Amino acid sequence: MNLADITTVKSILSQPQKIVIVPHKNPDGDAMGACLGLCLFLKEMGQTAHVISPNDYPKFLKWMPGNDEVINFEWENQEAKKLLDEATVIFTLDFNELSRTGQMESVLKEREVDFIMIDHHQQPGDYAKVTYSDVSMSSTCEMVYNFIGYLGYVDSITSDIATNLYTGIMTDTGSFKYRSTSSNTHRVVADLIDKGADNMEIHQQVFDTNSPSRLHLLGVALSNMVILPEYKTAYITLTQAELDQHDFKKGDTEGFVNYGLTLEGIIFALIFIENKDEGIIKISLRSVGDFSVNQFAREHFSGGGHDNAAGGKSDLPMKETIERFNEILKTYKSELNP
């Protein structure tokens, strides 16, 4: 974040503002941790701030401090639109194109107010007055920590703010195992622990609370795994019928895609999940090493993200999607076998 942007933000926040903070659709731990952490910080500064989520998010994130005040755009549409109409500043966190907000996109595009973007994904859009974008960062939560520091308020981070930011960093780094986890990430995390984040409790809340149906669904996912050793690739499929049979709840498939990467010799893993309501196959992609799933998702499945973690979608049925994927994969054999 450069000096000019820091000065601009300080000027904006030197006056009372009505602030709305928005994560991407289907927000994950980093998105919600960043939004809730920033919201609590802005309230500490005396600002009026609200988090509006485009839609629902997993139960394992709903224990986070400030969660009870989150407004769901789908369920509380009139209240959300009223707050957006009244907003004088809108923060967009953990995404860089307004299309990532689903049904909120048209409402946000109509707002003629200052937008402030904080995000670590590639190829940011140009809709914001202030764009704090850094693809080298482990998470948007680490960036929010830095953002608070740039404003000169790191010492004002409370235990609740620290808890939210720690949660987002932990989830987006795969519990600190991804390449984006830098030495500075660990320094930030250490400070958050010093400020009151209970790392063991946070891990238990996010990862160690399972339902029998979720574990049974994991069993189905693993039994559906297809391993393609010649392409160093493994993929999982889950149909809507399989989801329904196991009482699927939002967030139940979180982390399933990573099981493919635990196999020896596998560097590319995917999960294809049927969503009948949206008429799509949702795709999550992961890799290790230099194979860019961001590029793969952008070129073939209307998606994107990071070099080693990305998402996409297919409008074809499951069978045709897998057939198309297998044909595409053939053209990447040399990249997957360097």
Image (cartoon, rainbow, N blue to C red):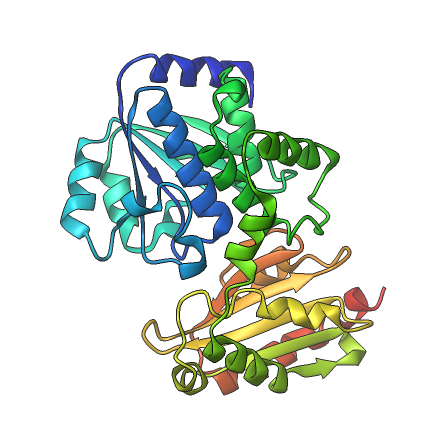
Which of the 4 image quarters holds residue 8? top left
Residue 16 position (above or below residue 68): above
The N terminus lies in quadrant: top right
Residue 15 position (above or below residue 246): above
The C terminus lies in quadrant: bottom right
Figure label count: 0
Q: Nearer the viewer, residue 334 or 84?
A: 84
Is residue 246 found left or right of 261 in the rendered image?
Answer: left
Is residue 199 found left or right of 64 in the rendered image?
Answer: right
Coordinates of residue 323 in the picture (x, y in percent): 58, 84
Coordinates of residue 270 in the picture (x, y in percent): 61, 71
Q: Nearer the viewer, residue 134 or 158?
A: 158
Coordinates of residue 337 in the picture (x, y in percent): 83, 68
Q: Residue at x 34, y 71 (%)?
A: 278
Q: Is residue 121 visible?
A: no
Coordinates of residue 215 in the picture (x, y in percent): 53, 77
Q: Nearer the viewer, residue 194 or 180?
A: 194
Q: Is residue 274 visible?
A: yes
Is residue 37 found left or right of 67 in the rendered image?
Answer: right
Q: Residue at x 51, y 80 (%)?
A: 217
Q: Residue at x 50, y 24 (%)?
A: 148
Residue 245 position (above or below residue 204): below
Q: Residue furthest right?
A: 338
Is residue 231 found left or right of 18 in the rendered image?
Answer: right
Q: Residue at x 71, y 51 (%)?
A: 177
